[in-house]
Image: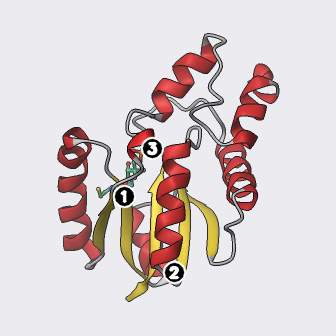
Amino acid sequence: MNSRIAVVPGSFDPPTLGHLDVITRAAELYDELHVLVVHNPEKHAMLPIAQRLSLLEQSIRDAGLAGNIVVASWSMGLLVDYCVEVNAGVLVKGIRSQVDVAYETPMAIVNRGLAGVETVFLLPDPAHALVSSSLVRQVAGLGGDVSAYVPPAVAAFLDTGARDL
Ligand code: PNS
């Protein structure tokens, strides 16, 4: 597997500025970066996968990135199956706190054991340390302004397009 090809997986429900920060850093570190929307059956989703893909694509384009980034989704099995399919040797995860380390460590060990895929933890800008998709979902769901926490395309969508969901 190629250690110059990396995958940033997540629910991205919705994408936040914290996600975009990790994507930006990872795109600078790797030759090819796959931003992968993974269906997580344990979470009750707010946005359909297609909507999350479209918001990610738009946010990545608006941030002037896109060059070496592929946006895709995966709901057909293990995350490492996708890594094998695209020959990616690295998973990249953003770490905001010790809670994230505790949550991510067992998954990183299992993913390495399953397919030899390494996990790299990146520290986002502290400005985004408290931002999470679940908080954004809660605030947006109650009619609050989330524009400080999400890319402009996501804020615009949550302000208007999400009303029909
Ligand atoms: O944004 P999230 O919800 O924290 O992302 C979690 C995600 C999707 C990265 C995680 O649930 C995941 O890796 N799912 C893939 C399922 C899998 O491969 N499980 C076995 C190894 S951990």
Q: Is mark 3 within 8 Å of ligand 1?
A: yes
Residue assigned mark 2: 86
Q: Amino acid at mark 2?
A: Val
Which label number is shown at residue 40?
3
Q: Earlier in the sequence, mark 2 or mark 3?
A: 3
Which is in the foreground here, disc 1 or disc 3?
Answer: 1
Q: Earlier in the sequence, mark 2 or mark 1?
A: 2
Q: Amino acid at mark 1?
A: Lys
Residue assigned mark 1: 93
Q: Nearer the viewer, residue 8 or 23?
A: 23
Quadrant position of the N terminus in the picture: bottom left
The answer to whether 34 is drawn above or below residue 104 in the figure is below
The answer to whether 53 is drawn above or below residue 147 in the figure is below
Classify residue 12 by image quadrant.
Answer: top right
**Residue shown at 44%/40% (left/top)?**
127
Disc 2, disc 1: CB below 8 Å?
Answer: no
Disc 2, disc 3: CB below 8 Å?
Answer: no
**Residue shown at 23%/45% (left/top)?**
103
Q: Position of residue 119 (x, y in %)?
A: 29, 68
Q: Earlier in the sequence, mark 1 or mark 3?
A: 3
Question: What element does badge 2 sit on?
Answer: helix
**Residue shown at 18%/54% (left/top)?**
106
**Residue shown at 49%/79% (left/top)?**
85
Can I make out residue 38 in this image? no
